[in-house]
Amino acid sequence: MVKRWLIVAAWLALTPVTAVAQEPSCCGNLQHILTALQREHIQPIFNDSLLSQRIYHEFFFLVDPDNLVLSKEDIATAQVHEYRLIKYLMANRAIFLTDASSLLHTRLAAYEQWLKNFLTKPLTYQASDRRADLFTPAFVPASALSQKRQHYFTEKVLAALHERGKLALTGEAFAQAEAQVRAALLKQETLRINTWMDKEKRIRLIQENFAKAMAHAFDPHSDYFTASDEASFKSSLSAQTLSFGFEIGENEVGELSIDEIIPGGAAWNSKKINEGDVLISVQTAGQLHDLSALTYEEVDNLLTSPDLQQASFTLRKADGSLVTLTLHKSKIEQSENTINSFILNGTKRIGYISLPAFYTNWDESLAAGCASDVAKELIKLKKEKIDALIIDLRYNGGGSLKEALDLAGIFINIGPLTLINSRQGGIESLKDANKGTIYDGPLAIMVNGFSASASEIFSATLQDYNRALIIGTPTFGKATGQRLISILEGKSALKVTCEKLYRLDGHSYQGQGVQPHITLPDITSVIPVREKNYRTTLPPDSIIKKTYYTPFPAFPVKLLQVGSQSRMQQSAAFAAMREFLQVMAQPAGLTPAAFQLHEQQIDTLHAQSRSKVVPVIQARTAMYDQTVLAMDDHWKKTNEELARELESSLYINEVCNILTEYLDLLTKK
Amino acid sequence: MKISFRALFTLTLLYALPGMAQQKSPAVVYLETIGAEFNGVSSDMMSYTSAATHGKGARKVEKRRQELIARIELAERNVRKMKPFEGDASLRDSVVHYFDLTHKVITEDFDKILNMEEIAEQSYDAMEAYMLAKEKASDKLHLAYESVDRQQDAFIAKNKVKVIAGSSKLSEKLKEAGNVSNYYNKLYLLFFKSYKDEAYLLDALGKPDVNAKEQTKNALLKSASDGLSQVGPIAAYRGDASVKLACQQLLSFYQNEAQSATATLIDFDLKKENFEKVKKAFEAKRAAEQTQADIDLYNKAVKEFNEAVNKVNAVSNDLNKKRAQLLENWNKVSDQFLSKHTPRYNG
């Protein structure tokens, strides 16, 4: 032993010691995140090369989601790292993160220069120009990057001008309007770029995006959350949230302004804030934030942060005067997360409930979730002896699995509802928690390509039981469940896909979604934004598990399909809708005239798809709610607007037609 | 009752073969040996049943149960030790299988004879799974007995044993105990289904989920209404309609509880939410915006809400009182019925 030490000491004495550049040590947190993912994920990836490759590609799509900063060749310069990221991580080497930081710094500087060149001069419009990548993000060769950017920003300028009603202007007036929009866009983009140009912020953002890329590499719904991300996520699925009671937006000249004031909230009660007031600055404990130096997202994050309970706001009123006041956050109903119910009166009386999300109460306090709220609405509708019921889940992106099962249980007496394979529990059947039903009459569920996750569990279950007619377009195709786990001593969270869901026969709707009994084409028929379009989506599979349940008799689907198709063929409203969808699927021409024409066509066809509807229903609020309506002017106004929208919706009218036809068939039996 | 009387009663027939005693042929001796084991088990079964239904203390009842279990184990061992009769083990094996199954049923060792995972899948909850398991176990036991019966018939035919039909006092008592048990169980199951459904309802009423409250209320309404329609045609037992009447009273109570009383309680949740919305909307209005109509509407909402609160408290108290009375009556009547009609037997 002693001899060996001597040899080593001699060798050291002979070899000159030179200064070696050290990579900053990086990766303790990232290692922790990787371990958590591999421990919790339902389909973990242990093949280092495959995982590395996926992280590599996801990372670049995260840091440059519109593929405007980097070219294919830029990504190729870092290709030496493509299969080695896990090795670096485990060896605590920051080489990829360092290289990515340098690459982004250089390319962002070039991008900023390009933007300045492009957006400080009047645009040149070419009749043949169109965006080539309307729905499919992809990095392009360097030779094509400039054109891609041109198309992107030309479209943005034209869209902003259209929004401000200035697209039809000509000559000097147009030039002035275009200049204003270009300036606002440049300011916005520069603010975003500046965040990345600051070295410290850039390193933090790169680490955060790398962590997100790791999660996305496993599947598109796993994610890494900072504390603020987590709070926003939970808030988006709650019925109530703490808020200052106003929504912000950007006015015509790109200033942050008050878009809406929520009645009963802190801003409302202050009596000093009005819609249209411009937000100048916000003073939080120890820090004054100049809002002109922040992006919309940064301001939104600041104001919705759970750590912020009160702040002092300086606003500019319509008359130019400045006002400063302090507001404390208070609880408000999340209007996106409350349900609406109506009676649709036609030849039959049909109840209608729309559910925007499967919200719940994360803190499990005494307040219940959406299943309980639907139950209340159903009790009110039943008092009016409805003949049938519609539950509208279009654009409902999901939420709580428990709420979805509780909601399904409202229509099913007892039995299994879905099969689940979870990392923690293996394969089991999830059953109806509550014996009994609330409503036993005919039921239709409206879905579309944005009905996802919990919406799909609910629809698939009721379809398997033959309990509901599913009407609309195929659903999103997400048959996985996630849970939030706290990591890094509570400073961050991981949303991990820890379970897969299956129908009662063991098959999965992963990727393809729940297929409706009757199809009514809508925007999701033409826009490819469903589960199967994600790069790292999990493939569908099946399981074997014996279940015992008694489905109801099958619906006369063929008969109802024929009836619906016949009505749609004869309907001018549906003809307008079909044309509208064709136009939406095509990119707009990138000249003011072509863009305006495209937008006008869209607006006209969309309006015709409403105005040409031959309504078969009149919508009103349930009698039970009349007292509240009489007292709450805001709610009354919102409800009246919603009622008129329902009456003029070609989808709602057609679903009512289908249900009426079904009820008539039942009477004949 | 922990075992189906159906099979055990008919077991004694096997033993009751008078006339065979005069001919002590080997075949008869073989049959009598087996018959003696059945007789032993039947005797202990009757002792246990008698103790359970005639007000003996829990310790004594448990003692009788343990004696029964031990006797079944002994019977199985004794029959298993018997040699096949002239090379034919069919009768012996069917009897061993029967005793083995009986033991598992008495000790509720259902895992060994049933696929409990499948039973759980078919059941709403643990109680339903248990009752389904008991029912399926009893069916298996009956099949096992039928096998014994077939083997006995085959043995008698093959060995030309002369059989004279008859019965003993024990078999008569077992038959009577079986009739009482079947009658009582029919009514008990109808009561118990609603009793369980009410338990779920009461649990739901203590939580905020309106869906759980309304669903369990409707489930109780259905089971109580179905129960009442099934109880109606059941006749009195030897002129004793006490259990039937107690069952009907409870089911009517459950039906009323679901139909009107609980509906009032659940409606209160909606009334409360409505009132809170009216109050919030009223208070959100600036003083100058509050019209006389608003003030009148608000005062009306306050009055209606206070009335609803009082009504809810009265309804809850009334339900609790009635429930306690009817359950006490059911337990008393059940004990009296079983004690009166189940034969006594001291083994």
Image (spheres, helix red, strand yellow):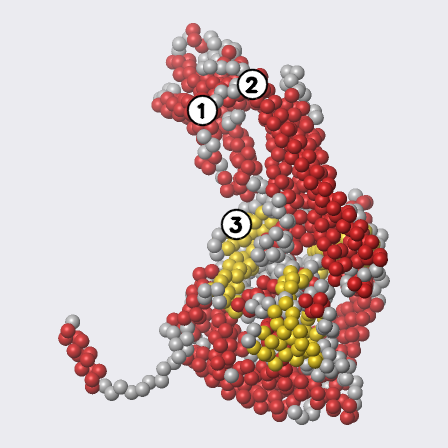
Q: Residue B339 carries which label?
A: 2
The single residue placed furthest to the top in the displayed view is B22
Question: Residue shown at 80%/74% (left/top)?
Answer: A604
- Secondary structure type for disc 2: helix
Which quadrant of the figure has residue B76?
Answer: top left
**Chain under numbered label 3:** A
Crowdedness of circle 3 by 10 Å Cα count: few (<14), some, many (20+)? some
Which quadrant of the figure has residue B222?
Answer: top right
Which residue has dot 3 on it?
Answer: A428
- Please give the count of numbered marks on the rendered protein: 3
The location of residue B202, given as percent across then percent down, is 62, 40
Horizontal relation, residue B13 to residue A450: left or right:
left
The location of residue A176, given as percent across then percent down, is 74, 90
Q: Which amino acid does label 3 sit on?
A: Glu
The location of residue B214, given as percent across then percent down, is 68, 45
Above/below status of B179 relative to A161 = above
**Which one is nearer the viewer's eye here, B70 or A319?**
A319
The location of residue A306, given as percent across then percent down, is 57, 67
Above/below status of B5 relative to A187 = above
Crowdedness of circle 1 by 10 Å Cα count: few (<14), some, many (20+)? few
> Is residue A100 visible to us here?
yes
**Chain under numbered label 2:** B
Above/below status of B207 relative to A508 = above
Which residue has dot 1 on it?
Answer: B59
Between disc 1 and disc 2, whose residue precedes?
1
